[in-house]
Amino acid sequence: MIIKTAGLRKDFEVRKKAGRLRRVTETVTAVDGVDLTIERGELLGYIGPNGAGKSTTLKMLTGIMVPSAGEVTVCGLRPVPDRVALARRIGSVFGQRSQLWWDLPLRDSFALLRHVYRVPEAEHTTRLKACRKLLELDEFMDTPVRQLSLGQRMRGEMTAALLHGPQVLFLDEPTIGLDVVSKQAVREFLASLRDKGDTTIVLTTHDLADIEKLCERLIVIDHGRVVHDGSLAALHDRYQMKKQIVVELEEPWAGDQRLDGAALVGVEGLLIRLELDGASVGQVVAQLPAFRDLAVVEPGIEDVITRLYGSDRG
Amino acid sequence: MANPYVKLLGAQIRSQLQYRASFFLDLSMATLLSAVDIGALFLLFRVTPALGGFGWREVILMTAISGAGFCMADLAVGEIERLKHYIRTGLLDTVLLRPMSALGQLLVLDFATRRAGRVVQGTLFYLVALTVAPVKWDAARVVYAIVAPINAAVFFSAVFVTLAAIAFWWIESGDIANAFTYGGRDFTAYPSTMFHGWFRGLFAFGLGFAFVAYLPALALLGLSEPIGLPDWARWCSPLVTLVVVLIARATWLAGLRRYGSTGS
C-alpha cells in the first residue's frame, strides 16, 4: 500500500473571547481517528462538507502539518520528518493557489520545476510532451500565467504537479470554478491517468460529477471521522438510494393501482414517478397501463450525500 | 544541473523586469532614501563637534559599516518580514511541498531586486568612509575591513529572520519587529558611547548591536573601547554573529514546527 494512516488525529487550539479580557482555549478536533489504506494506482475520492477535515488530512499526508496523534506513512515515508524526500515522490494541485510563476510564460514554470525537482532533461521532455498533448497546452505555452484563463491555468497546474513523475497525486478541488469544457478536459485527463495505473490519485472535491465519473472508491468524512469507505454503488446500497422511473401515461393515473416491487412517489398530470423496490425496470413496466414515454433515473450522488450528512447529524 | 536556488532567483528577477517602469522607480526611490540617511549624519555634526566622544571621521566609518551591512541584509532577506502574507496566501504551503529548504525558497521567490541599488550605494559610501577615516592599515585590518560589512550583513539577516519567525506565534508582530530591525540599524550607525544606562546595556551588549559596526570600526581605527571592553573584544564580532545566526536558525525551525502543528 502506498498510503496508510491509523488513528490519524488533529486537534487545534482555538482561543475564544469569554468576557472582556478573559480568553478561553478550546480544543477543536479537525480529524478524529482516520484509518486509511490506499493501494498503488487507486483513484480515491475524499469527500465531505466544508470543515469536515479534508484539507487537514491532506496537509498531514503531504507533510505540511504534524498529526496530533496516530500513524501516517506515504510512499513508505513519514511525511513531516521526511518532507524533502517525500516532496520528490508526490505532486499536488490545490485549486485555490498556484505553484506557477505568475509573471512568466507557462513554459518557464515547467523549466524551473525541472530544476526544483532535479529531473533529468530527457525524462522531463517526455513527460512534458505527453501533458502538452493530453491537456492541449501548446496554444498558451508562451503566455504569462497571469493572462491565462482559470481553465488553462489549471491544466498548467496539473502538468506542473506531474513533471517529476510523482507516485501520488493530491488534488484539492481541481475543478472548482472551471467552465464546463475545462472541467471535462481535467476529468478526462485524470481518467486517463487513472487508467494507466502508475499514479495513485487522492481527490477532494465538491463537484459530484467528478466523483461519479472518476472515483472507484469514495471515502466520506464528516466531523473528522470516516463515515463511508467503499464504492459509489455501495454508498447507494447502504443508504438505500433507489432507481426511479418516470413514466408519461396515455391516461391520467387512476390512483388505486398497486404495483409489485415499486412505490409511487409522485404524480403530476400524466407524469408519474416510481421508485423501484426489489423489482426490475421490466417487471414494473409490465404492470403499467399504456404509456407514451419512459425514463430511468439513476440516484444522484447529491441525494446520497445529503442523506448521508442528514443521517449522521441525526 | 544548475543550482535550483540560482534558477529561482533568476526567475524572480525576470518577473520583476516585466514591470520595468515600476522597477526603476522603486530603484531610484530607494537610492534617494539612503541619501537622506547619510545627510542626517552630516546635519548632526553641524551642531556638535563630537558624538559619544568620536569625531565625524570616526563615526562615518561606523555609519558606513552598519549601512552597507544593513543594505546587503535587506536585499538578501528583507522580504522575510512578509511571512504573515506567505502564510495567508498559502505560499508557505507551496514551498513546503517542494524538495528544498522553505526559508531558502521564500528568500529567492520574493527577492526584492529593487534593493540592489542601495547595496551599490552603501558599498560606495563604505569605500569613501574607509579613505576618509584614520584607519591604521595593516594586513589584519585589511581583512577585517572586508569582513566587517559582511559580518554586519549576516548579523542583520539573522535579526530579520528571528523577528520574522516570531510571526509564527504572533501574526501581528510586524511593528515590534520593525522597531528592532530599523531601531537596530540606527543604533549601530552611531558609537555605542552615545547611549547610556540600561538602554545601552540592552542594545549594545544584550542584543549584541555594539559588535555590528562600533567595535569593528574601533578595531580598524586602532582605538581602545572607552567603556572598558578589552581590546581583543573588538575583533570578536564574527563570533557574536555566529551566536545570533544560531539563534535565528533555532527560532525559524521552531516556528516552522509550530506552523506544522497549528497551521497558522
Image (tube, rainbow, N blue to C red):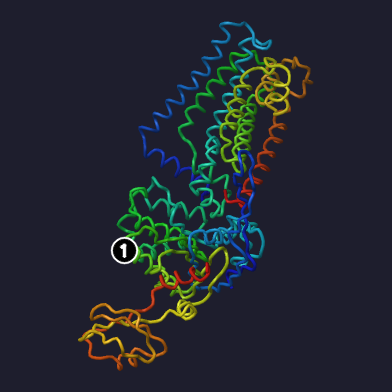
Q: Residues within 10 Å of mark 1 (few under 14, many from 20)?
A: few
B254 versus A93 height, above or below = above
Give left or right: position of A89 versus B226: left
User: What residue lies at 32% left-to-right and 79% top-to-bottom?
Assistant: A266
For the residue pair B244 and A62, the one nearer the viewer reads as: A62
- Chain containing mark 1: A
Residue type pointed to by label 1 = Val
- Coordinates of residue A9 in the picture (x, y in percent): 63, 62
Residue in view at x 54 percent, y 32 percent? B74
The residue sitting at 46% across, 57% down in the picture is A94
In x, y percent, where is residue A180?
A: 31, 63
Q: Secondary structure at mark 1?
A: helix
Q: Is residue A183 left or right of residue A94?
A: left
* Residue B49 vertical position relative to residue B110 in the rendered view, above or below: above
Residue A295: % across, % down: 28, 82
Q: In this view, which residue lies farthest toward the front?
A: A256
Q: Is residue B8 above or below residue B50?
A: below
Q: Is residue A200 above or below residue A233?
A: above
Residue nearer the viewer, A314 or B133 = A314
Residue B160: which quarter of the image? Answer: top right
Mark 1 lies on residue: A180
Q: Nearer the viewer, residue B132 or A63?
A: A63
Residue A59 image-quadrant placement? bottom right
